[in-house]
Image (cartoon, rainbow, N blue to C red):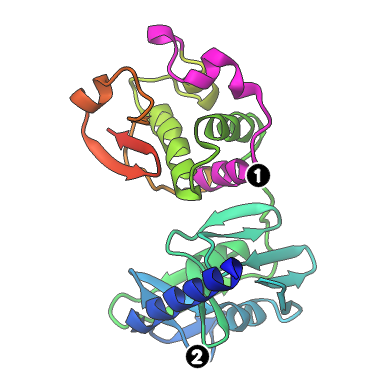
Amino acid sequence: MKKILAAAALAALLTAQAAAASPAGSLTVNGAPVEAAGSYVHQNTTYVPLRAVAEALRPDAVVAWETDRAAIRADGLEVTARPGDTYIRANGRTLAAPHGVHLSAGRTLVPVRVLAEAMGASVHWNSATGAVSVVGGASADTTETAGGDDLYWLSRIISAESRGEPLEGQIAVGNVVLNRVASADFPDTIYGVIFDDRWGGQFTPVRNGTIYQEPSARSVEAARLCLSGANTAGESLYFLAPALATNHWVMENRTHVVTIGSHWFYK
């Protein structure tokens, strides 16, 4: 019963999102007009029906609904998009879709730029008319590029610090690590940030050894999303759980950005 209610709530939310959106401009794929009924603009993002664009980009593609998600399969290409998720998967790579995958009138709708990237294409947008042009897609190189040591360590610190948090909160923890990498005040690698030993160490899991535990599947997904550009914590450089923290220096000296789950994030 809970699953049925959750599914109904999700469907109602996505329907409301579609209803509140504005119609999108015309759409062409490789120069040919595409009838993409149901396209719309939601939070400055153009959403298009996955099937219409996928089949126009790759005539050899088979597009089908598989249990709880839409799937595109062609030679060398496998893309899946599940309504409600904030990402799509392409050949094992995770591509962030911050405003979600939508379901409207029986169609799976995705951000056109994300779908184009998944299928090896590019998008051109006419700001005057709202027209969208998708070009490319003959072959797609969408293999995982954000991996190796970065994925290994980022997924572990996310899991150790926020295993019980929602996906948005886990992404935020990863954002803090990546923001530190980009900051002149911290080491310039993910490994260096995690194992920075100033002031007795930056992260509790490094001190107590839980950093070495196998990460949860959701934490690995969150790490992939962070590495592909997903951001839920803005410019945050610090986070803490006030209910557990014994040192409140961050709360007293830094600017609060957002609260997600049990964590408060600061810059």
Q: Residue at x 59, y 35 (%)?
A: 155
Provide residue 37's location: percent of width, then percent of height. Answer: 50, 90
Quarter of the image that includes the C terminus? top left
Q: Magenta segment, which residues? A: 197-226
User: In this picture, is 148 found above or below 4?
Assistant: above
| First reached walking from the N terminus: tag 1 or tag 2 | 2
Secondary structure predominantly adopted by residues drawn in magenta: helix
User: In this picture, is 56 found above or below 119?
Assistant: below
Which is closer to the viewer, label 1 or label 2? 1
Provide residue 41's location: percent of width, then percent of height. Answer: 37, 77
Mark sitting on residue 167:
none
Q: Name the residue tied to disc 1.
A: 217
Q: Residue at x 24, y 37 (%)?
A: 256
Classify mark 2: helix, strand or loop. Answer: loop
Q: Is residue 34 left or right of residue 17?
A: right
Q: CA distance from mark 1 to mark 2?
A: 36 Å
**As shown in the figure, which amino acid type bears the numbered disc 1?**
Ala
Provide residue 223's location: percent of width, then percent of height. Answer: 56, 41
User: In this picture, is 203 found above or below 39?
Assistant: above
Provide residue 190's location: percent of width, then percent of height. Answer: 52, 27
Which residue is the extreme one toward the right? 75
Quarter of the image that includes the N terminus? bottom right
Of 209 and 121, which appears nearest the observer? Answer: 209
Do the CB atoms of the residues marked 1 and 2 lie less than 8 Å apart? Answer: no
Q: Name the residue tied to disc 2.
A: 37
